[in-house]
Amino acid sequence: MSTASTNPQTLLRQLPGIDRLLASSELEPVLEAHARKQVVDGLREILDQLRSQAREGLLEMGDLEAGAIRDRLVERLERRATPYYRRVVNATGVVLHTGLGRAPLAAEAVSALTELAPHPQRVEIDLESGTRGGRELGCDLLLRELVGCEKATVVNNNAAATLLILAALARGKRVLLSRGEMVEIGGSFRIPDVMRESGAILVDVGTTNRTHERDYREAIDGQTGMILKVHTSNYRVVGFTSGVEIPALVEIGREHGVPVVHDLGSGCLVDLAAHGRPGEELVSASLEAGADLVCFSGDKLLGGPQAGIIAGSREAVDLCRKHSLFRAMRPGRLVYTALEATLRLYLGGEDEAIRKIPALRWLTATGDDLRSRARSLASRLESLEAFEIEAVECMSQAGSGSLPAREFPSWGLRLVPRAGSAGELAAELRRGEPSILTRVRDDSLLFDMRTLADGDLHDVEQRLRELSAARTATAPTA
Ligand SMILES: *Cc1c(COP(=O)(O)O)cnc(C)c1O
């Protein structure tokens, strides 16, 4: 307990008024840099704080000086000027990190946004006739070409797509789903819950590890409105397992006039197996096999903005499009714009898509390339005094339930701080500008090269230099 030498009443009387502060030379640069209203609001709040501090006996005479008040004010204004949504350098090696907004957009999608966002743009107007046209037509036409559907539509995310499809095609009807596909994705999306919300009636068939064609045949009846297949995105059942694939489900569905719907989750448009990654079912393969509808996310393997894409037969897509829930799920123009620009990148073939779409580029980056990047960064940082640094092999993940439960080899930078814990250093990196997210393992930090763009590497290097310098400057000399 410190006994204040000056009594609170005296201090309170010394508190400068707002007008005097605003006229002081100390505040001049602050007023030049910030709107007057923000400065006045800030000062009011600080003077209130000072008043209550004085009453509690926690105030010193020095706190009342204009310079001290200015410092508080500047800190407050800077804190408030930092946006919540800001750039993060992803060194975690998780390519589609839901906490970091999943797929980073391709440069082409960003320029489409930059070009169109400040202006009115075509959304629902048919420019030929001047009448109202299809809102999602720009994406629809591209998807027809890219995945081979009759028609497609777009909603806010794949969870919305699933809910809409169930409500539009199977409200009040039975929906057959393998027990092994009754999944929860990301905590808040559970297939049985979505089913109930849609008004469809879940009928689980088979067992957790094995479901056979006969299980569907025995369960199907006159009340069945859909056979649903759900990609078990975030887990894999291994060992004694079997499931029924789309071609067999389509055959059963057709025999009974029941539509087959495939929730693909990620929605892959390029053959990743050909590029050394675990194969993921292609959207076009499900449609070719006869699925009436497929749905998938725009911001997973597709590499675009958050969206849910529904593609399939004209009749089934129209049922979704005309359902009253659609209006509550339709995206804004920024999403259509970024999605169209992303889809266009697939028109030039798989290699071009992989080159231009960051998520695909990161996912398919080769060991040689990652190793040479890790080694060159390690050698540039070798001389830092505060850290022990080396290039190491590591494992990356696709993330967001894409390519489930499979890690693939990568290269990274392993860093051990010579003083303090790895956790403390990770927190410092996370809180800095730009924020850098790493993986912490025991006493070390790992920077996976897979998810770092060239500009990111530069920022990582810069920050580590700064942190090392700050640590060695304050370290006690031996
Ligand atoms: C990710 C996923 C969803 C949810 O998609 P969002 O775009 O995140 O809403 C639904 N189904 C499957 C199979 C998924 O993998």
Image (cartoon, grey):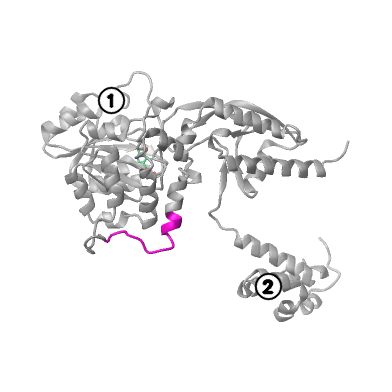
- Kindly check if marks 2 and 1 are in contact, taking CB atoms under 8 A apart as contact: no
Q: Is residue 3 above or below residue 110?
A: below
**Going 43% across and 49% down the picture, which residue do you hit?**
109
Q: CA distance from mark 2 to mark 1?
A: 68 Å
Instruction: Bin the neighbour count of mark 2 within 10 Å (Cα to Cα): few under 14, some 14-19, many 20 and up.
Output: some
In the rendering, which numbered label is found on residue 61?
none
**Going 87% across and 39% down the picture, which residue do you hit?**
477
Can the viewer see residue 119 in this picture?
Answer: yes
Asked whether 121 or 192 is in front, the reply is 121
Task: Give the residue number, with chain letter if any, for mark 1.
Answer: 243
User: Residue 209 appears at what percent x and percent y?
Assistant: 32, 24
Can the viewer see residue 177 in this picture?
Answer: no
Q: Secondary structure at mark 1?
A: loop
In this picture, which residue range is highlighted in magenta?
Answer: 113-125
User: Residue 440 appears at what percent x and percent y?
Assistant: 62, 35
| Three-letter amino acid code of the residue under disc 1 | Gly
Which quadrant would the C terminus be assigned to in this image?
top right
Q: Looking at the image, is mark 2 or mark 1 nearer the viewer?
A: 2
Residue 115 on the magenta segment: yes
Which quadrant contains ligand 1?
top left
User: Residue 241 appears at what percent x and percent y?
Assistant: 32, 21
In the rendering, which numbered label is found on residue 31?
2
Instruction: Bin the neighbour count of mark 1 within 10 Å (Cα to Cα): few under 14, some 14-19, many 20 and up.
Output: some
Q: Secondary structure at mark 2?
A: helix
Quadrant in which residue 475 is drawn: top right
Judge left or right: residue 443 versus residue 201. Answer: right
Which quadrant would the N terminus be assigned to in this image?
bottom right
| Three-letter amino acid code of the residue under disc 2 | Leu
Magenta span main SS: loop
